[in-house]
C-alpha cells in the first residue's frame, strides 16, 4: 500500500484514530477493479506503424497537454478502485476555494466496524464522519491530530494521480498510443507504457515535475516495485478520463484504477450542519468510553 494513494480516504479519516488507537490499523484498502473493466491488448506493432499507434514526441506532447488541461479544471470527481473485492473510494475535488469530499468503502476492522469513512475538508477545517459521539455525526480535527502530518495531502490526493501517471508515461520511452476506445461512453485515446522506476528517478526532462517525480518514485519503491505498467485514456476534449497502474511489489500484485468525470460540475462542497459536529475533545471522550 502506498503512503499516499490507495486508501487515501481511510488514511485521512484514520489520522485521528491512529492517535488514539495505535496498532488497530488505519483501514488499509485495496480496491475493486473497474466495473466491466478488461485488460487492453498489448500493442501489435512496436515500430509505431499502423492505425491507432503513436510514440515519441507526439505522445509526450499529448500526455503533457492532457495533464495540464485536467489540472486546470475547477472541479471533478475521481472514482478510485483496485483489486476485486477489496474496496473503493469516491473523491470530489474543488480547486477554489480549496475543498474536497472523500468517501471510502473497505473491509471492516476493529477501528472501523462499518468499513465506511468520509472526510470533508474546506475552509481550513477537516470534518470526519464518526459514530463515536452520541448525537453527533462528525468531529473536527485539531492541531493535536495533525501533528507531524502533511495538512495539504488530503486535498491534493482528492484530485487523484493525474500528474503522477501522465508525467511518468510521458517520461517513459516505451509509451505508445494503442488506439481509440470508449470510456464512460466517450471516445478516448488509449496510451500505455512500462515505467522503470530507476529510469524515472534519473529523468530530468519537462514531462514531469521534479517534486511529483520524486514523490511517485519514493512511494513506488516503498511498495517494492521496480517497474509498473500504466494505462491512460484521454478524451477527445483533451481531459484525462481514466488511468490504471499495475505492478508487482514486495506484498504481491498491486493495482490502482481511477476514473475521472464531472469536470467543472461538482456540486458546491459545504460543511456539515454545526449541530452535528463534535469537537476533538468530545471525540476523544467517545473513544475512551468505548474502550
Image: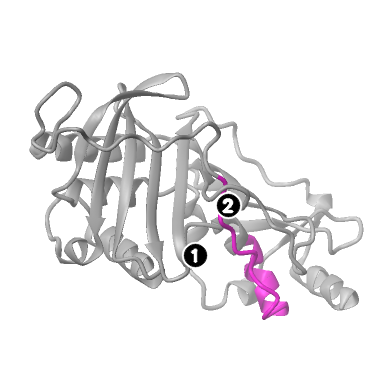
Q: Nearer the viewer, residue 114 or 19?
A: 114
Image quadrant in which you'd find residue 45: top left
Q: Which residue is mark 2?
A: 123
| Label 1, residues with CA under 10 Å away: few <14, some 14-19, many ≥20 | some
Residue 188 horizontal/vertical position (percent): 33, 25
Q: Residue at x 30, y 21 (%)?
A: 236
- Residue found at x 85% / y 56%: 136
Q: Is residue 51 above or below residue 259?
A: above
Question: Magenta stretch?
Answer: 13-32
Q: Residue at x 72, y 78 (%)?
A: 20
The mark nearer the N terminus, 2 or 1, is 1
Query: Could you say whether the residue bearing mark 2 is in a helix, strand or loop?
Result: loop
Up-down relation of residue 244 to residue 59 (above or below): below
Res 228 seen here = yes
**Quarter containing the C terminus:** bottom right
Mark number for residue 213?
none
Residue 132 percent coordinates (x, y)? 84, 64
Q: What residue is drawn where x is 82% and y is 51%?
A: 276
Left or right position of 126 against 280: left
Dot 1 corresponds to which residue? Answer: 1
Amino acid at each position: 500500500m502506498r503512503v499516499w494513494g490507495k486508501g487515501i480516504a481511510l488514511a485521512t479519516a484514520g489520522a485521528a484514530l491512529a492517535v488514539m488507537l495505535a496498532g488497530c490499523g488505519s483501514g488499509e484498502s485495496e480496491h475493486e477493479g473497474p466495473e466491466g473493466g478488461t485488460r487492453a491488448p498489448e500493442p501489435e506493432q512496436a515500430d509505431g506503424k499502423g492505425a491507432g499507434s503513436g510514440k515519441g514526441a507526439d505522445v509526450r506532447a499529448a500526455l503533457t497537454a492532457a495533464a495540464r488541461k485536467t489540472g486546470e479544471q475547477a472541479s471533478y470527481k475521481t472514482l478510485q478502485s483496485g483489486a476485486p473485492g477489496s474496496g473503493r473510494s469516491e473523491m470530489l475535488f474543488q480547486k477554489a476555494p480549496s475543498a474536497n469530499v472523500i468517501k471510502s468503502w473497505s473491509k471492516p476492522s476493529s477501528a472501523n466496524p462499518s468499513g465506511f469513512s468520509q472526510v470533508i475538508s474546506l475552509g481550513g477545517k477537516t470534518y470526519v464522519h464518526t459514530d463515536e459521539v452520541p448525537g453527533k455525526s462528525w468531529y473536527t480535527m485539531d492541531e493535536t491530530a495533525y501533528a507531524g502530518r502533511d495538512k495539504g495531502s488530503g486535498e491534493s490526493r482528492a484530485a487523484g494521480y493525474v500528474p503522477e501517471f501522465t508525467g511518468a508515461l510521458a517520461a517513459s520511452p516505451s509509451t505508445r498510443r494503442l488506439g481509440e476506445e470508449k470510456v464512460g461512453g466517450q471516445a478516448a485515446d488509449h496510451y500505455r507504457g512500462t515505467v522503470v522506476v530507476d529510469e524515472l528517478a534519473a529523468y530530468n526532462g519537462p514531462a514531469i515535475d521534479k517534486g511529483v517525480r520524486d514523490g511517485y518514485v519514493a512511494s513506488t519503491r516503498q511498495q517494492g516495485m521496480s517497474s509498473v505498467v500504466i494505462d491512460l485514456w484521454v478524451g477527445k476534449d483533451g481531459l484525462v478520463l481514466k488511468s490504471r497502474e499495475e505492478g508487482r511489489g514486495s506484498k504481491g500484485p498491486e493495482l490502482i484504477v481511477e476514473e475521472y468525470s464531472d469536470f467543472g460540475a461538482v456540486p458546491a462542497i459545504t460543511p456539515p450542519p454545526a449541530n452535528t459536529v463534535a469537537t476533538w475533545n468530545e471525540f476523544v471522550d467517545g473513544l475512551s468510553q468505548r474502550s
